[in-house]
Image (cartoon, rainbow, N blue to C red):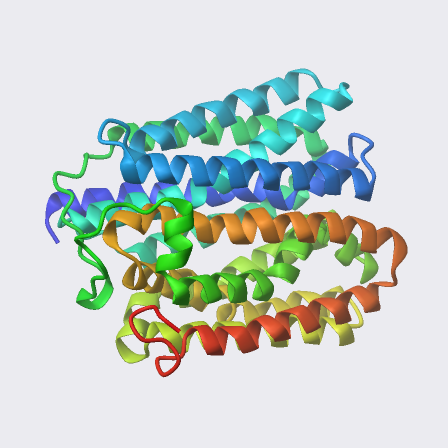
Amino acid sequence: MDTTDRRLNVEYSALQFSYWIDYLIIASFAAVLLSGRGFTASEIGYVTTTGAVLTIVLQTTLSDLADRSERISVRQIILALLLCGAAVALIMWLIPKSYAVSFICMFTALSLMNTLSPLTVSFCLQYNAAGRDINFGVARSIGSLGYALAGFVMGRITESFGTEILLPIFCGIQIFMMAVVIFMKKPESDNVVLSRGQTVADEEAPSNLLQFFRRYTRYDLFLLSVMLVFFMQMLTSTYMIFFVRHYGGGEAEMGTVLSVMAFAEMPAVALGMYIMKKFSAETMLRVSAIGGFLKFTAMMFIPNTTWLIGSQLIQFFFSGLYMVAAVYYINSIVGRRDSVKAQSIMAVGVTGICGVAANIGGGWMLEHLPMQTILAFGAAVTGVGMILMFIATSRKLFRNDQA
């Protein structure tokens, strides 16, 4: 690894580290921040649902723009989203008593952060395609470290100084991320090299959305399976404070839960590229789905917050293996000119469509159903997703992306 590659690895790791701190602040602490401003569980669901809908619009539009445009780069789109994120957080902080401002700024900030996630992944893949050696797994594990540390720290900061302190912190980190992206050396080539040397339909022009779903049958079923596997993860992420309170905890315990969850997935993400040399991406994704099913089934039998914190160790096998395997698996089953679109559509499925269902359904269920019923329903949905994951990653059922 030469000097340029080492510098890029440090810079990209800093980008991931910062992104996941801000994601925790604006997504995982959304219910805490909004409930502190007088929002009910259902109203929080409306905010996060609106954010998920806007995410769908932004991700599909911007990913298609990134794939097709010769003038607008992924870098430029990332910078624009970061600038907007800093602006809406600042507005929300300066006008704390307005319900409408809180509603609009919060769902806008949520959608901007959700839209950034697949773009930062594509940003890394563009450098790899240009011959630069950025280790996505290590960088993403450092992002999990940021999330873990922030979860531990933010829970205690909010108990000491109130939830409003989160907004200026979020704004400052957005500005820092902009500086990191600006100073990163631009990719010098657009020659795409996919995981393990696989390429799919390199000669084809970028697809529109309808063509995309018709062209990649394997991807379609994989998308559905991921949405079901991560449904309960999305629901608990938005409403974590309600689950923690169910087990007898508060904001500090919530921060610990989030911290342990992130720490647990770090080794799997950091070693993801090494694990992928020993096991196929398909195997890793299947183990991930099993991990999700076990995690949310176990939550039905947890007696207190200590056990809730301990159950987060399953995250190593759940999202830890998924994060690296999915990125390279997706890039291996779609054409290179659809790669940004493919990563973004997956994010749309999880944070957008699945997020809408989880946020609307979660808000309603928390106000009308016993917690055990919610946990049983979540485990059942995850189980269906696990079964579909086994089918979607089967090499016998799919040949060249056709059923």
Note whether 49 is above or below 227 in the view shown: above
Q: Can residue 148 be seen in this view?
A: no
Note whether 96 is above or below 301 in the view shown: above
Q: Where is residue 13 in the image (x, y as percent from the top left)?
A: 33, 46
Instruction: Kindly identify the residue that appears in the image at 32 percent across and 32 percent down.
Output: 180
Note whether 108 is above or below 344 in the view shown: above
Name the one closer to the observer, 304 or 403. 403
In the image, is 63 to the left or to the right of 184? right
In the image, is 204 to the left or to the right of 95? left
Name the one closer to the observer, 5 or 193. 193
Which quadrant, please, contains the C terminus? bottom left
Name the one closer to the observer, 372 or 49. 49
Which quadrant, please, contains the N terminus? bottom left
Q: Position of residue 156 (x, y in %)?
A: 67, 44
In the image, is 162 to the left or to the right of 138? right
Q: Where is residue 148 in the image (x, y as percent from the top left)?
A: 53, 53
